[in-house]
Amino acid sequence: MADPGTFVDYLTADHRDSDTLLAWLQEQADAGCFAEARAAFARFRADTLAHFAAEENVLFPEFERLTGIQNGPTEVMRVEHGDALALIADVSLALEEHDANRAHGYAEALLILLQQHNLKEEYILYPAVLGAAGSNAAMLSARVVQAREGTVRPDLQP
Amino acid sequence: MRVVQKHRAAEAGSDGSCVSSPMAVSTADSPSPDLAFAHMLVGVGGMGAAFALVAIWPGALASRWHPATLAAVHLFAVGGLAPVMFGALFQFVPVASGLALPQWRRADPVLLAAMPAGASGMAAGFLTGELAWLSIGAGLGLSALLISAGRLAFVLVRCQQRTPIVFALYVALLGLLGALACAAVLIVGLASRATEISIALIDWHALWAVAGWVGGLVLAVAGMVVPMFHVTDAYPPAWGRWARSLPLWLLAGSLGGWLGWAWLVGPSRYALAATALAFGVLTMRLLLRSRRKALDAFRIGWFGLALGVMATASLGVIAHSTNDTRWGLAFGAAGLVGFAGLGVNAMLYRIVPFLIWLHWQRRNKARVRLPLLHEIIPAAAQRPQMWIHAAGALLLIAAPFAPELARSAALLLLISELTLVLLLVQAMRLYRKNVHQLDLMPARQQSHP
Ligand code: HEM
Ligand SMILES: [Fe+2]
Ligand SMILES: [Fe+2]
């Protein structure tokens, strides 16, 4: 990437990539191609966990520090991450058991959950952090990218 | 696995301020979906009532001024579309703007009841010619819609987001206010038995309502739903800027109609049609490129909506350039039933199962296996219902030209709405039953068996 942009662009692109992966794995599972579905799922899960970790370890604390709001939007986002993790575990189990019906249903719920979650982040939370960060945005962005690409928090593993 | 807790953040933004807490509200805080569900059921029932009326008086499709036409239109719009759309806004606005629509525990059921009651009063007034009924119905309907519009305005002016979705919500709000302003003038005219009721005013009342209000809401929802749920690219940014001009054309056209400036009316109508056509083409293109191929009821509904808006735009242009009034009727049928009706139908299949599932999930401390999304409203039932609706809409659009089709069209649409009511009622009963059972179960420690 020539211009890395801010963490907003970076995390938004991350959301879109995982939508595509999720749609694809759902299609594979519907078609009974479980090997392909599981491969896509493994990538999806790793990406999503790292993404959540970057948000929960870097971005959300930054929001809380900058705005002084502890139990507000970031808490809602954490709860939704928790919902997503539960669903990721459900999809995982369904794929292991080659249960296309359940895999489809859980993946569908996960897709909707993540869509409305991502929308709130992209339109509301990310711009708020970016605005509050001011001249520190570039440094914050670097930290977010580093966290996203380097870490997988063990306690976020389903 | 982290335990998913019920969080306590709900109060943070309940005063409606989005300055201190830009995202205080989300699905997580919606206390329970009951209010939204009640709106949706009432609304689908209202649409069914409109089709029952047409089935009884198929002559409705013969003239714009047939009393049954006016009655059916308002049963559909004020008793049907309005409750569903305001119900959906309870869920949609928080996601789009970060702010919840305030809920009024005592007043909300009254406000909701006023919509079908007002629509019925108006229908009775049109059918019997009794001005008293018409005035009471219109008074109720106007008040309920104005108060609901006020609630939306209250949230929008507080919201600092300036996204295309928030703009589209503004368009919807302006559209509703424009339609209601024209309606108030019309009603005062009718009630004072004015000799001449301006047809231009009726036209613009209908256009503000359908293009402005319904169109604006569909734009808002589409901007969010199409890219995300169909997994496609976003609408081009140029489209978002263009779509903002919608109220401008409505305003210019109504002013032109009022002042008798034909040179302003024509171009405004063409600009509206071009906007609608562009929206249909763009939506269709996105849907065809969607990275999700499964043809479920939701996708069928969105294809239908895209076709419906293109048909509406084309019929509107034809209706404007001919003296044959049947095109105007076809235009109305396409706009209300093909475009708005199908859109509402498709969205219900997405919103209702998800809300139910989410509220279960949050209470599922025992981690028991719950019905899947496509089992909450059985997918096998959704598709035929959707096809019946689409077929009914097609026949209804054709009915002004082939009057013998009117009754079959109305019956198909009635069956479709009754099926939808049944499916929704079943889903909501399942919701209640499981919520009750989940609340009784002990929490489980580990996440999976
Ligand atoms: C409570 C609010 C409303 C009132 C009081 C009202 C009142 C009226 C009146 C008095 C007319 C003219 C009837 C005549 O020619 O005698 C009319 C026509 C019409 N209204 Fe409404 N209206 C309301 C809401 C709506 C809404 C929300 C919509 C659509 C979404 C709508 C769509 C139409 C249409 C399409 C016509 C023209 C019917 C035709 O050309 O055959 N109205 N309305
Ligand atoms: Fe997130
Ligand atoms: Fe995110």
Image (spheres, coloured by chain):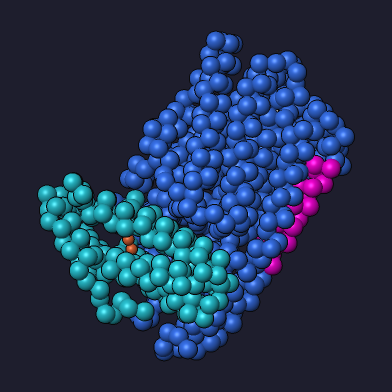
Chain colours: A cyan, B blue
Residue A136 vertical position relative to residue B222 in the rendered view, above or below: below
Residue B205 pos. (x, y %): 62, 28
Which residue is located at x 68 percent, y 21 percent?
A: B319
Which residue is located at x 76 percent, y 55 percent?
A: B418
Which residue is located at x 41 percent, y 58 percent?
A: A19
Which residue is located at x 26 percent, y 65 percent?
A: A55
> Which stretch is magenta?
B408-426
Q: Is residue B118 visible?
A: no
Residue B366 pos. (x, y %): 49, 85
| Quadrant in which residue B142 is drawn | top right
In this view, the residue in front, B366 or B255, is B366
Is residue B421 magenta-colored? yes
Is residue A62 magenta-colored? no
Residue A18 pos. (x, y %): 38, 60
Quadrant for ligand 2 reads bottom left
With B5 as the anchor, is B256 left or right in this view? right
Residue B40 pos. (x, y %): 63, 55
Residue B214 vertical position relative to residue B40 in the rendered view, above or below: above
Q: Is residue B167 visible?
A: yes
| Quadrant in which residue B2 is drawn | bottom left
| Quadrant in which residue B13 is drawn | bottom left
Residue B276 vertical position relative to residue B258 in the rendered view, above or below: below
- Which secondary structure is most common in the magenta stretch? helix
In this view, the residue in front, B361 or B393, is B393
**Figure label count:** 0
Question: Quadrant where the N terminus of chain B lies?
Answer: bottom left
With B111 as the anchor, is B167 left or right in this view? left
